[in-house]
Image (cartoon, helix red, strand yellow):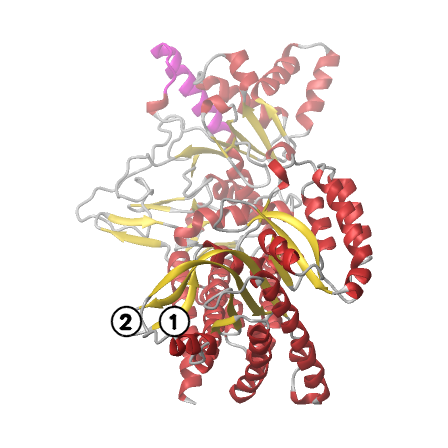
Amino acid sequence: MRGKISQLGWPLLIFAVTCLVWILFSQVALLPLRNGNLFLGPDGALGFLEHQTINARFSVRGPLPFAENIIYVNVDAEAIETLGNFPWSRETFAVVLDALFKRGGIRSAGLDFVFSPAGIPQLGRAEAEAGTLALGKTVREHGNVVLAAGFSAESRTSGPSGAFPFVFEPQRKGEEVRLPEMPSFPIVGPTWGHIGLINTLGEGAQFIPFFARCGEHTYFPISLQLALLGWGIDDAQVKVGVNEMTVPDASGKPLASIPLILGQLVEPNWFAAWDDNPQTSVVTVLGADRLAREGTDEEKAEAAQFFEQFRDAVVLIGPTDPLLKDVSVMPLSGQQPVPRVSIHGNLLQTIASGRFLQRPAIWVNVLLITAMGFLAGSAALVPHRWSGTAKIASIAALFLYIGAAFLVFAKWDIIIPMVAPVGAALSCAFLATALQLSREQQQKRRIQELFGSYVSSAVVNEMVEKNIPPQTGGVEVEITAFFSDIVAFSPIAEELPPTGLVELMSEYLGQGTAAIIDAGGTLDKYVGDAIVSIFGAPLPCADHAAAACRAALGLQAGQAFLRERWIGEGQRWPLRVHQMASRIGLHTGPAIVGNIGSKLRFNYTMMGDTVNLGQRLEAAAAPYGVEILVSGETHDAALRDDPSLVFRALDRVLVPGRSQPVDVYELLGRGEECAASSAAKIDAFARAREIYRRGDWGGAREAFLSAAEREHPDSKSNPSLAMAARCEKLQGQVPTADFVFSLTKS
């Protein structure tokens, strides 16, 4: 019981630590530093990634219906070309405002320009003062005009906040109250003009500070000021809470409740791409105003029709020419930067519609991250027989979560985290896979410990007969290396109790070893379920390649015999045991053979490139769907000594770890009956391979598919299908030299 708890405890602890790391990276909004707080945002250090997923959610959701009639009047490239370089005389804006209020009947206007004394145009003093006076007169006359103000970019802390008085920044003792840069008298005065902030925060102006306390006065953004003008409410009535701002009506009932992030920030909802907003140029407004004053009756009618679109609208006047450098990449508008004046318009739409973006509480985010991480890692906590189902469920849950994130955003404007939960899920899934592989290795080691004491009797007999004491060292001889491995052994081991596994492996290894010994081979070792053998040592054997091939066929026959017996024993053995098969790789060449190891512990074994290639060929049999794969050297030597063996030429490949290609063959059987029954299959595959070697991928694919009809009807994977799939992938590619195909490690 304690072992089971320990086995579960370690994975759970690893998953918990992994999820905690993702939580810390995604949920810490402020990073304390010596000189202040570094703003990371509600998505923490992963904000730059989460921002991309939020933009994707906007794109998938699409535009929203407008709640407010907002028209943009742009200081664009046409206006600058017509009126000259910016800044212009402020009288120009006075003329535009007069035209919009008197001829267009607009409800209110917001100007995304800071008309401070520092921004006076480079004109003569008298002309500049006249322009300022004209703008102030217009603002005073029409009343519902909001003028921009903003805090400078001078950094008071090491964070990105600048001089803005954020509530989450420490206030230095004795520090003077800082005011925003804003219009002065006579543009605004004691009883006229409204001030609205234009500051933003975060990547792509993702967050907007919604108030700034400066001494006794509180400033609000330009969007909220325009909304207040529309409601006829003074900004002094706005109530600022800890996590919410409330705008009450005359009776005290809330007109709007604005959720705040970190007690001060609002995340704008986006209603349309920039190009889909109603907009016109300042030059067009000035031209229509001139026609209304000086044009013919027909031109005056056209001007009146133009101004009719502005009736009861909110107008935002701002810079849109990219040369004025007031653009950013915004949601719904692709990767092309768009004017930042659109931020204020979308915020006003957000306020008017009440569709504020909302984020769950931190504890909800923590729960989501933890749940996704543990769910994805669950494959390592269930028995092997159910691990496949658990993996499928984890993948399905991951995609369902991503879909849910898009759905709740589109339906309810809720932003649930995506990067951290998905990251935690993928991380835990990776760790779960590593844990599962570790368990499989433990199963291999268990088999190795059970049977590792068995040694080749031929080695013992030779040492006794020749009075050779156990010592280390070896000699170089030509051998055939024999490697066999059970296909999908780990699931079989997982389904059996230890006693059943020992009994099964005893029968299998006994049959395999008997086939090897009967053919004149030497058992090197058992490596878990694998059998490693040497043909041609320690006792010389002239036909060792043919003997190894006969041993491989003998192992196949012995395993077929065992399968029939296991099936006859009914439910005692699971279905995987009834279907158990092995892969075998053979290669002939020089190798070092002898007692390899230390003086305290050694083993009679083989070493060298021949051995490595034999092992690689066993693994390489899998992609071709064959049970016995031999090298060209083994094929040639075996046929020389035993012409009754039947082979099929498969491919010319580079195995992992080698620079020289090797021809590979499938050993089909032995004798005239096998040759006759395999002739059609061999010929069809050979014809397809000839087309393949001409680089005709399409023709070769069709030929291999035709050859597949002659393969064993019960085989789900075979060389013909494998080569057809390869030809499909090679479509359009230039053939490699000598048509060598590189195999990868599985």
The image shows residue 5 at horizontal and vertical percentages of 42, 84
Q: State the residue in front, 431 or 309.
A: 431
**Quarter containing the C terminus:** bottom right
- Residue at image position (52%, 26%) is 320
Span shown in magenta? 120-141
* Side of 450 relative to 705 (left or right): left
Q: Quadrant of residue 389?
A: bottom right
As drawn, 46 above or below 77: below
* Side of 687 relative to 594 (left or right): right
Residue 124 can be seen in this image: yes
Crowd band around label 1 with a 10 angstrom C-alpha radius: few (<14), some (14–19), many (20+): some
Q: Secondary structure at mark 2?
A: loop
Q: Identify residue type, mark 1.
A: Asn
As drawn, 593 above or below 658: below
* Side of 465 relative to 520 (left or right): left
The image shows residue 196 at horizontal and vertical percentages of 43, 38
Q: Give the residue at mark 1.
A: 603
Residue at the left extreme of this rendering: 174
The image shows residue 285 at horizontal and vertical percentages of 60, 20
Marker count (numbered): 2
The image shows residue 200 at horizontal and vertical percentages of 42, 40
Dominant secondary-structure state across the stretch colored magenta: helix
Tell whether position 121 is magenta. Answer: yes
Q: Give the residue at mark 2.
A: 599
Tell whether position 691 is magenta. Answer: no
Residue at the front extreme of this rendering: 466
Q: Identify residue type, mark 2.
A: Lys
In 3D space, how far apart are the residues under numbered discs 1 and 2 (Cα atoms)? 10 Å
Q: State the residue in front, 584 or 623.
A: 584
Q: Secondary structure at mark 1?
A: strand
Badge 1 vs badge 2, beta-carbon distance below 8 Å: no
